[in-house]
Image (cartoon, rainbow, N blue to C red):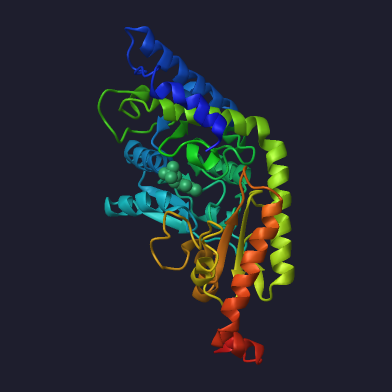
Amino acid sequence: MDPRVLEAMLPYFNHQFGNAASRSHSLGWIAQEAVDQSRNQLAQLLGVVPKEIVFTSGATESNNLAIKGIAEAYHRKGKHIITVKTEHKAVLDPCIHLEKEGYEITYLDVEHNGLVNLNQLEDFIRPDTILVSIMWANNETGVIQPMAKIGEICAAHGVLLMSDATQAVGKIPVDPRQAGVHILACSAHKMYGPKGVGALWVSQTQPRVKVLSQIHGGGHERGMRSGTLNVPGIVGLGQAAYLAHQDMPIEAQRLSEMRDELEKKILHNIEETYPNGSQTARLPNVSNIAFKYMDGEALMMSFNQYMALSSGSACTSASLDPSHVLLAMGLSGDMAHASLRFSLGRFNKPEEIDTAFNHLKRGVENLRAESPIWEMFKDGVDLDAL
Ligand SMILES: *Cc1c(COP(=O)(O)O)cnc(C)c1O
C-alpha cells in the first residue's frame, strides 16, 4: 500500500470513527463526507458520475453482485450470458453458479495472443443474451481486450456489457462510458490501496442498468449493498484512485521501461524462453514468460526468498492445475506449467531489474544442469514430437 494512502486512512480508524450512515451527529457527517470524497475521486479516475458507484468488499464481491444481480434482474428477458475462458475466477465461478440455476453461459475462446475473437462474440449474441462480461485486462498476462470494439458490438445488439477492470483501473486510462461498458468492477488493493475494499460502477442513465442486491439489510449504497461502510477502506480506495490518476502517465512509462528491460534480458540471455500473450495490447507492468522444458513452480522456489512471484494468479495458486488462462490461449499443459508471471509496481527501482534477472538466471541454470529433459533437448531429441 502506498504510504500516502495509509496516512489518509489512519484518522478514520480512531478519532474520526463515525458511521457514515449516522445522520444525527457531526462524527457521522465527517465520515459521510469522507466517503463522498472517495466516491468523487474514483468517479474522476473513471470519468463517471459519483452516485453511480457502489462500494463493496473488493472485486470478487463486485463481480458477484454484477453478474448475479443482473441475472436476477433480467431473467424475464433471457437467461444467456457470454463471457471468456480467460476471465478471473471471480467472474467464472459466479457464472458456473448461475449454470446450476438454469442460466446458459457461453465461454468465448481467445486467440493465441490472449485477445478475444470479436467475430465469435458477435456470432454468439442471441435475443435472450442479457449480459456480456469481458475483463479489461488479464491478471496473468496483462493482455488488454479491445473494449471499445466489444462495446460497439454489444451496443449494436442491445446487450449489456460488464467488465472486470480490476487490473486496468489505475494502471491505464479506463473510461467505461467511452468504451460502451455499462458495469465495471475494480478493487483498491490492485492500485496501492488497502485489501478488502472495492467498487462496482453501474450506469444509471443511457442505459439505466438494474442490478438486484445480493446482500440485504439496512439499504446502504442505494439499496445495492447493505452493511456499515468500511470508511477507512473507502478513504484508502479514494486516495489510491486520486494518486493513480495523478501519476498514471509517468508511472506507466517508468514501469513499462523496466518491464521491457527485464523481458529483453530474459528473452535474449536465457535459452528457450517465450513471452506469453500480446506484446502490444498489454498492461505496462506485467510480463508472462514460458521457460520451456522447466517446471515454473520449481523455478519459482529457487528464488522465492528474494522475489515474490507466481506461476498463476494468487487466487488459484493453491491448486497445482496449470493456468486456465494459458491453456485457453492454446499453450500445452507443459508450457503453462513452465510459465511465470512477473509484475512490477510503484515501489520497484530500476536496479532491482538486474537483481531479479540474476536470481532468475542462476535458478534456471541450476535446475537445467540437473534436468534429464534439458539434457535430451540439448542432445537434439525432438521433445515436442514425443
Ligand atoms: C484481484 C482480482 C480480482 C479479485 O479482487 P479482490 O478484490 O481480491 O476480490 C478479480 N478480478 C481480477 C482481474 C483481479 O485481478
Can the viewer see residue 130? no
Instruction: Judge from the rendering whether residue 130 lies leftward or rightward of residue 75; answer left or right.
Output: right
Residue nearer the viewer, 62 or 321:
321
Q: Quadrant of the C terminus?
A: bottom right
Q: Position of residue 225 (x, y in %)?
A: 34, 30
At x 31% / y 51%, what residue is drawn? 97
Q: Would residue 129 be found to the left or right of residue 114 on screen?
A: left
Say which of 261 and 128 sits in front. Answer: 261
Residue placed most toward the observer, 47 or 228: 228
Residue at position x 41%, y 58% from top? 316
Q: From the viewer's side, name the closer residue of 69 and 186.
A: 186
Q: Position of residue 137 (x, y in %)?
A: 57, 49
* Residue 170 to residue 89: above or below: above
Q: How many marks?
A: 0
Percent position (x, y) of residue 58? Answer: 42, 39
In the figure, 156 relative to 89: above or below? above
The residue drawn where x is 62% and y is 92% is 381
- Regarding residue 44, the answer to whether it shows in the image is yes
Residue 134 rendering spot, x and y as whole percentages: 51, 48
